[in-house]
Image (cartoon, rainbow, N blue to C red):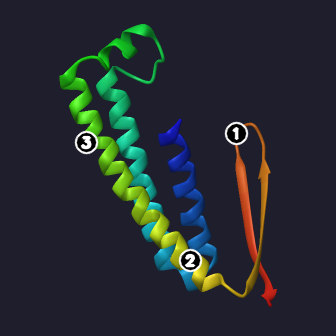
Amino acid sequence: MVGEGRSYGAGYIHWLGTVNPGIEKECFECANELRSSSDCAWKMNELRGGFGQNEENARKLAEKEIRTPIVSLILKARRHELKAVEILQRIIEIFQGTIVRIGVVSSLHLKSLMCETVGKR
């Protein structure tokens, strides 16, 4: 779930950069950090034997040779997320004083995200 959420976040932030040229560089950097964090989560699932939430996968966490690389991946994901937060703070600073409207339209298979700058305060 965490990996999936970071992946959706990366897609949204990347899109935000494509429609807002003033923050394009920051958005693309942030999206890359979120993708890297997502990759760490998926690698953790692979080490446990897949995405399943069953007893077999849970028991693998008791094995040191499984836990050790997972801990490394957790720390790596944390570094990527901290960097993403720093970049998001820069984006917020750039937009300070600007009113931004964000709307979300979703269906079963598609999420359309729209953002437009409405005006300056």
Q: What amino acid is labelled 2 in the image?
A: Ile
The residue that label 3 is drawn on is 72
Tell whether 47 sits left or right of 85: left
Considering the image in quadrants, where does the C terminus appear? bottom right
Residue that extends furthest to the top in the rendered view of this protein: 55
C-alpha separation, residue under disc 2 versus residue under disc 1: 29 Å
Number of other residues with Cα within 10 Å of mark 3, as a class: few under 14, some 14 to 19, many 20 or more: few
Q: What amino acid is labelled 3 in the image?
A: Ser
C-alpha separation, residue under disc 2 versus residue under disc 3: 29 Å
Label 2: state its secondary structure: helix
C-alpha separation, residue under disc 1 versus residue under disc 3: 34 Å
Residue 77 x/y as whole percent: 36, 49
The residue that label 2 is drawn on is 91
Q: Earlier in the sequence, mark 1 or mark 3?
A: 3
Residue at image position (46%, 78%) is 25
Label 1: state its secondary structure: loop
Residue 102 x/y as whole percent: 76, 66
Number of other residues with Cα within 10 Å of mark 2, as a class: few under 14, some 14 to 19, many 20 or more: some
